[in-house]
Amino acid sequence: MVATLSAAAVTAARTSGLHAEQETLPREQLRQLQLQRLQQTLRNAWDHVPWHRRRLHAAGLDDPRDVDSLEALRRLPFTVKTDLRDNYPFGLFTRPTQELARLHASSGTTGKPTVVGYTAQDLSTWADLVARSFYCAGVRPGDLVHNAYGYGLFTGGLGAHDGATRLGCPVVPISGGGTERQVALIMDFQPRVLCATPSYALALAEVAERQGVNLRDSALRIGMFGAEPWSDAMRREIEARVGLRAVDIYGLSEIMGPGVACECELRCGLHGWEDHFLFETIDPDTGQAVPEGEPGELVITTLTKQALPMLRYRTRDITRLETAPCDCGRTHLRILRVTGRNDDMMIVRGVNVFPSQIESVLVGRPGLSPHYQLVLDRHGALDSVRLEIEAQPEVSTADYPRLAQEAAHHIKSLIGISADVQVQAPGSVPRSQGKAVRVRDQRPRVA
Ligand code: DLL
């Protein structure tokens, strides 16, 4: 657990959730609601998407009603990102585009983008869930929101915008980039809430410091940070430099966008909104369920999405689920911090490593800055990893080799891999305007 709140604050959180009734439903009732909504979702997919019907049929279903318990969900096939690409652009939509209200897309690193669609009702549900997430994190109607998530096809900008508006918060729709101007506007407008990727929040702090501005003197009190993996060490760093409470918000475009899950004021896991989604964790190699509390790949089924229902979508995100009640009074399960994506997992001489593990070992260490990249390379048959990390501005270059040696020692003893660490001058690692690029893979491509 990251922080404890006063008894009064906990009582307030317990009694005044934005959707208090839905957020505190006894788990048995929640499960009944999930089953009913799962059946509607299956009917929607079966009736309107031939691809889903074919696959459900192949899995032995003669009718969506055959799924008569939540356990029966496990009979259904998984959906993966390439299924969306293979049905590009609209093959998995239940409606013609004339009946939709908006499209978003994520670029991805290879090939076609992944396109997602929303009905007006879907957009309204999404705004509700982001509003619920913001409220759960401590944002209140009337709070001015500086929204530095990118506007456009990325779901971060408009998703956070609509949710903040739904909660009754005025929004500064600044989007990403133009960091100097963002700092000036934060000091002039005095927003209480900052929405950004954690790496961009740090970039803002850094530019502010260079301009002689201390963001701790601003009105910022709550940061709604997500869209990329980040460590608790990074959280402490941002909180110290920006002077706010950093809250973790999770989501993905295939499922909706931001607001699938969010930390409450107690920050001991992200409440996954179970009246709208079904969460499972599986062993990524076998596809079998892992026991609660054990790490596994997060799999999500949507329960209320109209335009693009998703059945057992494999997120590639590695996390753990906890259904034990939270002290805030919400009954919805908690998704523990997403430590990384399967895709970002590096296997260095047989050891599985996520960039966030390296981040948590190094960020906050004296002399080192939180700006880093990992470079994967191959020498002969062996993969190697190089860590490029910046020194703090006040550190003399004469100290770089010693810092590098110490960092390599910590990585070896705490994570078990040998990394070639290069401590570099401030400003040498590219800054993000959105999602940070943590890994540069320079290994030769296998044809
Ligand atoms: O990143 C949606 C979002 C916007 C979430 C703003 C939160 C805030 P995509 O671009 O589709 O959607 O990327 C989704 O980003 O599968 C995770 O790997 C990663 N991710 C998102 N939130 C978190 C988080 C948006 N809080 C992918 N912690 C997901 C760790 C996160 N990873």
Image (tube, grey):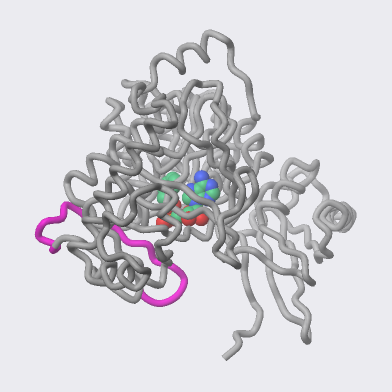
- Taking the image as shown, residue 431 lies to the left or right of residue 390, namely left
What is the x, y in percent for residue 300?
A: 43, 52
- Taking the image as shown, residue 16 lies to the left or right of residue 309, namely right
- Taking the image as shown, residue 25 lies to the left or right of residue 326, namely left
Q: Is residue 111 magenta?
A: yes
Q: Is residue 367 magenta?
A: no
Q: Which residue is drawn at 46% across and 47% down?
A: 279
What is the x, y in percent for residue 114?
A: 35, 66
Question: From this viewpoint, is residue 226 visible?
Answer: yes
Q: Residue at x 65, y 37 (%)?
A: 237
Vertical relation: 239 (above or below) 352: above
Quadrant for residue 57, please give it: bottom left
Question: From this viewpoint, is residue 190 visible?
Answer: no
- Taking the image as shown, residue 291 lies to the left or right of residue 166, namely right
Q: What stretch is highlighted in magenta?
A: 96-113
Q: Nearer the viewer, residue 232 or 397?
A: 232
Q: Nearer the viewer, residue 266 or 139?
A: 266
Q: Quadrant of the N terminus?
A: top right
What is the x, y in percent for residue 430?
A: 58, 59
Q: Residue at x 23, y 46 (%)?
A: 122
What is the x, y in percent for residue 287?
A: 54, 64
Q: In which quarter of the image is the C terminus?
A: bottom right
Q: Residue at x 54, y 38 (%)?
A: 208
Name the residue at the top extreme.
8
